[in-house]
Image (spheres, helix red, strand yellow):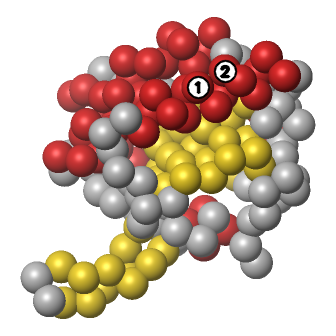
Amino acid sequence: MSLELQKAVPNFIAQATADTQVELAQLQGKQVVIYFYPKDNTPGCTTEGQEFRDAYPEFQAANTVVFGVSRDSLRTHENFKAKHGFPFELISDPEETLCQQFAVIKLKKLYGKEYLGIERSTFLIDANGVLQHEWRKVKVKGHVAEVLAAAQQLNQAS
């Protein structure tokens, strides 16, 4: 089952940092950015997290909450979050439940070896739980600004 633009995203419940449970249905009335990244404490993922952190007040002003998702453990997430002062929660998805729901597990190559990993992807869900934007095969540079602009535009339209 893959998600489609302009369609409601099925509810999910996931474990996140700060001992929280994230349930999509509980976020009605807020826009939601979910960004998937390969691994905590790697250069691209750190930069992406820092850019979401730096733009977080603007996301909040646009009625948007942000969640980062990877397969790392909650403990690793807590350290990553604390080290970089992320004001948003990180979802731990070791079973790849959310990764499968958003179809972000892809065959990747590293040093000639193939493996299944998370393809850097971001999704913007509107205040009614409908998927409005998706960015796949994300390049970190300039990405957060693009997501923020889409969130602001969507918030103004609602």
Q: Nearer the viewer, residue 44 or 75?
A: 44
Graded by Cα atoms within 10 Å as few (under 14), some (14 to 19) or many (20 or more), the crowding at tag 1 reads some
* Residue occupying image coordinates x 32% and y 80%: 108
Q: Position of residue 15 (x, y in %)?
A: 56, 48
Q: Which residue is nearer to you in this view: 89 or 47? A: 47
Kind of element beneath mark 1:
helix
Give residue 117's quadrant in the image: bottom left
Q: CA distance from mark 2 to mark 1?
A: 5 Å
**Residue at point 30% right, 21% down?**
85
Which residue corresponds to mark 2? 152
Q: Could you tell me which residue is drawn at 44 percent across and 33 percent down?
A: 144
Query: Where is residue 69 drawn, in percent x and y?
Result: 47, 51
The image shows residue 128, relative to residue 38, as above or below, that is above
User: Is the C terminus in the top left, top right, bottom left or bottom right quadrant?
Assistant: top right
Q: Is residue 99 left or right of residue 101?
A: left
| Relative depth, front residue between 78 and 55 | 55
Residue 26 at least partly seen? no
In this view, 51 is above or below 20: above
Amino acid residing under circle 1: Ala
Q: Where residue 52 appears, x then y in whole percent?
A: 42, 28
The extreme bottom residue here reads 113
Within the image, what quadrant is residue 33 found in? top right
Q: Quadrant location of the N terminus?
A: bottom right
Question: What is the crowding at mark 2: few (fewer than 14 residues within 10 Å), some, or many (at least 20)?
Answer: some
User: Secondary structure beneath disc 2?
Assistant: helix
Disc sitting over residue 149 in the figure: 1
47 horizontally vs 145: left or right = left
Give yes or no for contact between labels 2 and 1 (Cβ–Cβ under 8 Å): yes
User: Horizontal and vertical percent for residue 9?
Assistant: 80, 55
